[in-house]
Image: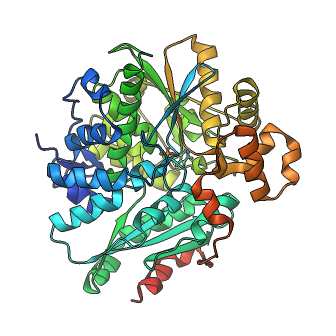
Amino acid sequence: MEILYNSTRTKGEQVTASQAILKGLSDDGGLFVPERIPVLDKSLEELSHMTYQQVAYEVMKLYLTDFTEEELKACIAKAYDTKFDTEVIAPLAEADGAYYLELFHGATIAFKDMALSILPHLLTTSAKKNQVKNEIVILTATSGDTGKAALAGFADVEGTRIVVFYPKNGVSPIQEKQMVTQKGANTYVVGIHGNFDDAQTGVKQIFGDKELAAYMNEKGFQFSSANSINIGRLVPQIVYYVYAYVKLLEEGKITEGEKINVVVPTGNFGNILAAFYAKQMGLPIDKLICASNENKVLYDFFESGAYDRNREFVLTTSPSMDILISSNLERLIYRIAGNDPMKNQMFMESLKTEGRYEITAEMKAELSDFYGNYASEEETAKTIFDLYDKTGYVIDTHTAVAACVYNKYKAASKDDKKTVIASTASPYKFTRSVMKAIDAKYDAMEDFELVDELEKISRVAVPAAIEEIRTAPILHDHVCDKTEMKQTVMNFLGI
Ligand SMILES: *Cc1c(COP(=O)(O)O)cnc(C)c1O
């Protein structure tokens, strides 16, 4: 059955999946949402015997209904191949009574690879399906991980160019090195003086600039987005929750239909929204546990029903979660507002002008699937230390925020359901913070010395993504003010 996509902001025309992927954001500034959430049409038992690629097809076909079987399977095959260092793509590791779903086995060792290795293929397929002749310009704001994963996904993909903006002083040294060493004639990486929210706001403004869009079209270009607001990123992220569940089932760790909890370290609310969609599709998930770092705007929201970004922005050791405007939350707000774009627009307008909004009691009652909490910097470090000390398993800072929040949830609720923790980055990506948490002595060492030390203590080989950048030359050194982003893009395109 065909599924069309609506905007969260106005009751306008509906678009197909491929059109929603091409556009990224709706013309009215809203996000695209499926008109209804499809239900899994294979049993969990059937799915449990499938490979990652097969599960991906079974889930994605339900959303991307204007893709042919052949098109979708080709996209999946190109995405989930030997770029991943394990055949199972997303392995589960059991440690201290929880299942860590390792989403970092792709090209850039963070979970963004799960969606960004397929998005370029979904996008170029969508362009063909819609007779788009323009070159597609991917514009991305990154808090660190999206940028590199998008660059890796789009580098030298024909008919595309990619521009990535990152906060110059807001990403880890390894994250920055990964981005500024990116190869590919169609790639452009720019540091901005500002934080992630500034970068994201700037990108949204460029997207909303109708005059610019018309001018670009004249010159043979059009924008699209690789940010997690693109439905082409959200849909591939639903896959691994289904996959995790059915693999636990296959291994006999759970019985069919048994409810599990899912814990997600959250920033832009994309990853946990995907888990929420998986639940709506019929996957037996009980609690969706939303873990924040000290930028705990989501925790406060789940507690009080008030979303308030008027607060200090904290730079933490989990920089990919240093976000005060969680863009994808809009899709949840729209839903709990009864899929009413007018209501949602009121909240978003208030967020824009006042920096806050407060949902109604009726809406808040719809949030009972969620549990929110947060981890302080100290707690995050202690969680890394404790887990390593107890089991020898080393997790990164983002995953540690989730593990810490899970421990808090378990202590408070006494809920002992089997639990999957989304492990969103390899500890090699945040080596300094991870090693410092394990022993303060490591802080005196150089970045790549730390990499070698981590290999010794974790007995996990240094990933290729890290080996590569040890000696790679820096190819991008552009820096601009947050007010100059539009001009920077135009310069890069030579228009
Ligand atoms: C992006 C990212 C997150 C946050 O994911 P959202 O979908 O933005 O909530 C968490 N951890 C890591 C390592 C990330 O790269």
Q: Residue at x 35, y 39 (%)?
A: 52
Q: Nearer the viewer, residue 467 or 268?
A: 467
Tell me the quarter of the image containing the N terminus. Answer: top left
Q: Residue at x 21, y 34 (%)?
A: 38
Would you place residue 185 above or below residue 437 in this image?
A: below
- Residue 332 in picture, x, y percent from top left: 37, 38
Would you place residue 265 above or below residue 429 in this image?
A: above
Q: Nearer the viewer, residue 461 or 72?
A: 461
Q: Nearer the viewer, residue 46 or 280?
A: 46
- Dividing the picture into quadrants, the one containing residue 47 is top left
- Dividing the picture into quadrants, the one containing residue 23 is bottom left
- Left-right relation of 180 to 72: right
- Left-right relation of 122 to 332: left
Q: Residue at x 68, y 36 (%)?
A: 394
Q: Residue furthest bottom?
A: 494
Residue 336 in sight in this render: no
Q: Residue at x 61, y 49 (%)?
A: 322
Q: Nearer the viewer, residue 461 or 191?
A: 461
- Residue 63 in picture, x, y percent from top left: 22, 43
- Left-right relation of 3 to 249: left
The image's colouring method is: rainbow
- Residue 320 in picture, x, y percent from top left: 58, 50
